[in-house]
């Protein structure tokens, strides 16, 4: 074997590996863009919900303060709860946050898994085979649901303590 044939063989293999690497980078960047879109959309949804809830609670607290100021000290001492803002809006916002986190986690898991499968199929040359949910996906889903349940219990406990 001549030196030129060895150089050509190495060169062709390196070019093939380089092309695969570029494709893997392209797939990875696309996956990260999709994941970023999921996170940004969820964050903006949470921001809108929480800012409107905060405005509503502030307006309710301000009107309660004005009412307490108008009614006088004796009326406030007799029934202080009636001057406080409702906790329902806050509870709804917290429950919405939990469901948004769960939904976002599921979407991120799907996006990252799809990107990983695409990279794996590109490197191995085998097409992506859609399977039932893997054990890791089931475990992640259970963890998200467990966390959501725990947060709901804490919110209920916090409301009861109010």
Image (cartoon, rainbow, N blue to C red):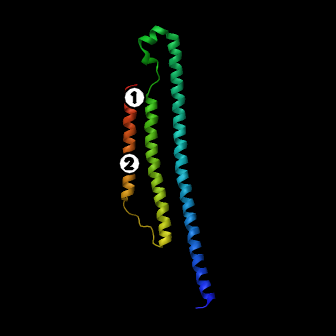
Task: Please identify the residue farthest to the right as the structure is shown.
Answer: 4
Question: Would residue 86 appear left or right of 66 to someone viewing this image?
Answer: left
The quarter holding residue 59 reads top right
Q: Residues within 10 Å of mark 2 (few under 14, many from 20)?
A: few
Question: Would residue 37 appear left or right of 137 to someone viewing this image?
Answer: right
Q: Residue at x 38, y 57 (%)?
A: 136
Q: Residue at x 52, y 53 (%)?
A: 35
Looking at the rendered image, the quarter that the N terminus falls into is: bottom right
Q: Are marks 1 and 2 in contact (CB under 8 Å)?
A: no
Picture disc at residue 159: 1
Disc 2: which residue? 143
161 shown above or below 143: above
Which is nearer the N-term, disc 1 or disc 2? 2
Q: Residue at x 37, y 27 (%)?
A: 160
Distance, label 1 to label 2, CA atoms, is 24 Å
Q: Secondary structure at mark 1?
A: helix
Looking at the rendered image, the quarter that the C terminus falls into is: top left
Q: Nearer the viewer, residue 73 or 10?
A: 10
Q: Point out residue 11 in the picture as x, y percentages from the top left corner.
A: 61, 80
Q: Residue at x 48, y 56 (%)?
A: 111
Q: Point out residue 126 in the picture as x, y percentages from the top left corner.
A: 45, 72
């Amino acid at each position: 074997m001549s030196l030129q044939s060895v150089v050509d063989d190495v060169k062709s293999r390196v070019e093939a590996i380089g092309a695969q690497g570029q494709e893997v980078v392209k797939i990875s960047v696309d996956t990260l863009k999709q994941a970023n879109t999921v996170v940004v959309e969820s964050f903006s949804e949470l921001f809108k919900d929480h800012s409107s809830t905060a405005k509503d609670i502030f307006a309710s607290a301000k009107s309660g303060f004005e009412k307490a100021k108008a009614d006088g000290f004796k009326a406030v001492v007799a029934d202080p709860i009636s001057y406080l803002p409702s906790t329902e809006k806050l509870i709804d916002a917290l429950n919405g946050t939990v469901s948004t986190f769960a939904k976002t986690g599921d979407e991120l898991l799907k996006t990252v898994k799809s990107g990983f499968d695409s990279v794996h199929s590109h490197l191995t040359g085998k097409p992506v085979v859609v399977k039932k949910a893997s054990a890791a996906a089931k475990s992640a889903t259970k963890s998200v649901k467990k966390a959501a349940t725990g947060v709901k219990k804490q919110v209920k406990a916090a409301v009861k303590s109010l």
